[in-house]
Image: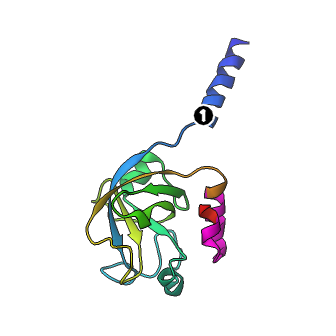
Amino acid sequence: MKRLLLLFVLLATLATTVAEDYTLRATKYHPGMGGAGWVTASGARIDNKKLKRYEIRWVALSHDMFRECGFRMGDTIEVECERVEALNGLWIVKDKMGRRLKRRIDFLLPKGDNYRFTSPTTVTIRKATGAAAKAKAAQQAAGDDARDEIYE
């Protein structure tokens, strides 16, 4: 009976884990420039028209974030940034950065973006949970243009 109770407590603890916050150095990248192609590490093809209309919100994480923090391709993350408010909200992990970089995130943005994000900054990220995260992932997978409904 004690073993059964212990197993139940262990499973309940695993099921209710809280998303942990990570503070990262943030930069941006543009597809097709500086070694960045038009296909991400996840195999997703970048649609430049959608990117220019800000309909896709994809990020690349450094390898250590996958290895040590448990992020995976396709995870929806919540970003908080005081300096560049346009970065706030939900983003989908679709790419990996170079192996030498640690505790970094790269935001996929169109060339000439209007985010006023000209130098590296600090952001806080966490895995997004709940209905908003699932809706964002489904919307990105389907290519739905109704992105603003998710943020309400």
User: Which quadrant of the figure contains the N terminus?
Assistant: top right
Compared to residue 48, the image places residue 26 above or below, namely above
Residue holding disc 1: 14
Q: Dominant secondary structure of the magenta stretch?
A: helix
Image x and y of residue 45, in percent? 52, 79
User: Which quadrant of the figure contains the C terminus?
Assistant: bottom right
> Is any atom of residue 30 visible in this view?
yes
Residue extent of the magenta highlight: 133-149
Image x and y of residue 127, in percent? 52, 51
Compared to residue 3, the image places residue 45 above or below, namely below
Residue 84 placement, left or right of 20: left
Residue at 63% from the left image edge and 77% from the top image edge:
145
Q: Nearer the viewer, residue 23 or 2?
A: 23
Queried whether the magenta region covers residue 47, the answer comes back as no
The answer to which quarter of the image holds residue 109 is bottom left
Image x and y of residue 46, in percent? 50, 80
Helix, strand or loop status at disc 1: helix
The three-letter code of the residue at mark 1 reads Leu
Residue at 48% from the left image edge and 48% from the top image edge:
70
